[in-house]
């Protein structure tokens, strides 16, 4: 293929290859610039559904506009084999860089930070990468990072170990749910970022093994090795990686940026920290450590205040405050100290709309044939769940697309059905929804 011109792209040299396809350096003869051509495996060209999935994923990825996401210029086919045309980056990949040894800490942190920004931007747009690994993290000539191959693992039908022909090298970065054969979500991408970060900071993957199968199994069942015991890194990083690599996706950081913030905070503390605190689950940030002396004084003050409250409190144990009351008794002014009950605290703010419950209700309405009602409820569910990466986000998108299709509003319906498939992969129910619009 070297020297051949495909469409307007002249093949110059082979850059690499594997189960996910072969990549060539090429020249765009019309625009006079170098590009990278990635040809997908032959299996994709023989599977009409995979071919359509490739086109859809490529379109979604090409719409992502972010400085840390590799730009896709074009897609096409040559002799029935699909290919992607993307920007050519001269700096190689982080996989190439890791072969030279562990990078400097600040350099590694910069790459992790840039990858996190790219993933968060993609997730906000409903795009899941599914194959985050050093080989897909490319560098330009100045060392700036771009994330490549968004959605291509799904397009090739190779985003879990249950698919025949999966690249075994990818097993080192698969989330537990992918290793079990489940569909990847944004939380799966964040898990893979945790593995990449672990490798960049220590020089090895957390579950590294000679056997890809053993490594994939370890992601599901093995205890997470403490990074402080595997390297010269501080103990403050242990809870950060325990959360980033949690087996349960719901226990991981809510965003990739939250993970990076906790990572930098843990590295900044070093040996001066007096205790190790796990990041708060709600925000992904760790609570600041209070020096022992100050913590003791604060605790003593709180204990004193608590004791005073108990002494002055009523039978219900609620805190009361002393109040001076002035009154006149037989012509004499008397000042008395009395206690008054504190007013009850204001009620908590109302909880946010429950997108899961709304999705279940929309599903029920569809089953009952109330498509107008289902459309209204599903639209609320989509708004509540957008960007969460949860399975229910995919279900809500499907419900909205199905209801709109039943109502004859096909242009909008197909957008939501496509979004649902991006999140959860190909399903027969989605095909049935599309058939309503034919």
Image (cartoon, rainbow, N blue to C red):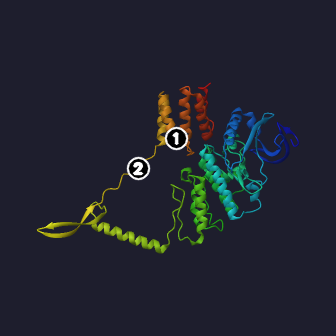
Q: Secondary structure at mark 2?
A: loop
The spot of residue 248 in percent (x, y) is 55, 51
**Residue at horizontal 69 percent and vertical 43 percent from the top:** 153
Determine the image quadrant of residue 73.
top right
Determine the image quadrant of residue 40.
top right
From the viewer's side, name the closer residue of 70 and 159.
70
Determine the image quadrant of residue 45.
top right
Give how far apart the Cα atoms at labels 1 and 2 are: 20 Å
Residue 207: in sight, yes or no? Answer: no
Q: Which residue is mark 1?
A: 383
144 vs 252, left or right, is right
Q: Which residue is mark 2?
A: 349
Q: Is residue 346 above or below residue 46?
A: below
Which residue occupies the extreme front position in the image? 331
62 vs 296, left or right, is right
110 vs 252, left or right, is right
**Residue at horizontal 41 percent and vertical 50 percent from the top:** 349
The spot of residue 375 in percent (x, y) is 50, 32
């Amino acid at each position: 293929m070297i020297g051949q011109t495909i469409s307007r792209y002249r093949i110059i040299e082979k850059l690499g290859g594997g189960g996910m396809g072969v990549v060539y350096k090429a020249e765009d003869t019309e625009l006079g610039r170098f590009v990278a051509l990635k040809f997908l495996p032959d299996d994709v060209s023989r599977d009409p559904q995979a071919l359509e999935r490739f086109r859809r994923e490529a379109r979604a990825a090409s719409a992502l506009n972010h400085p840390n996401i590799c730009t896709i210029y074009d897609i096409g086919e040559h002799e029935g084999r699909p290919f992607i045309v993307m920007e050519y980056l001269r700096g190689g990949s982080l996989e190439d860089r890791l072969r030279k040894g562990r990078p400097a800490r600040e350099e590694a942190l910069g790459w992790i930070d840039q990858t996190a920004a790219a993933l968060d931007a993609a997730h906000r747009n409903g795009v899941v990468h599914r194959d985050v690994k050093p080989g897909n993290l490319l560098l330009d000539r100045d060392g700036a990072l771009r994330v490549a191959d968004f959605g291509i693992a799904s397009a090739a039908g190779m985003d879990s170990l249950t698919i025949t022909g999966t690249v075994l090298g990818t097993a080192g970065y698969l989330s537990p749910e992918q290793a079990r054969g489940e569909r990847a979500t944004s939380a799966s991408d964040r898990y893979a970022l945790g593995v990449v970060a672990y490798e960049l900071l220590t020089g090895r993957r957390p579950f590294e093994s000679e056997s890809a199968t053993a490594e994939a199994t370890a992601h599901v069942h093995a205890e997470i090795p403490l990074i402080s015991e595997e390297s010269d890194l501080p103990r403050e990083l242990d809870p950060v990686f325990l959360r980033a690599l949690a087996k349960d996706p719901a226990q991981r950081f809510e965003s990739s940026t939250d993970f990076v913030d906790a990572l930098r905070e843990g590295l900044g503390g070093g040996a001066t920290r007096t205790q190790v605190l796990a990041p708060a689950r709600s925000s992904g940030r760790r609570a600041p450590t209070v020096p022992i002396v100050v913590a003791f004084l604060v605790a003593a003050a709180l204990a004193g205040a608590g004791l005073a409250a108990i002494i002055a409190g009523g039978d219900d144990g609620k805190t009361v405050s002393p109040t001076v009351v002035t009154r006149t008794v037989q012509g004499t002014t008397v000042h008395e100290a009395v206690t008054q009950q504190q007013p009850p605290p204001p009620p908590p703010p109302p909880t946010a709309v429950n997108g899961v419950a709304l999705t279940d209700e929309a599903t029920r309405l569809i089953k009952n044939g109330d498509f107008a009602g289902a459309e209204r409820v599903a639209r609320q569910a989509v708004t509540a769940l957008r960007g969460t990466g949860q399975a229910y986000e995919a279900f809500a998108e499907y419900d909205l697309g199905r209801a709109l299709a039943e109502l004859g509003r096909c242009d909008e319906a197909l957008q939501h059905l496509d979004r649902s498939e991006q999140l959860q992969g190909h399903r027969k129910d989605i095909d049935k929804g599309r058939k309503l619009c034919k």
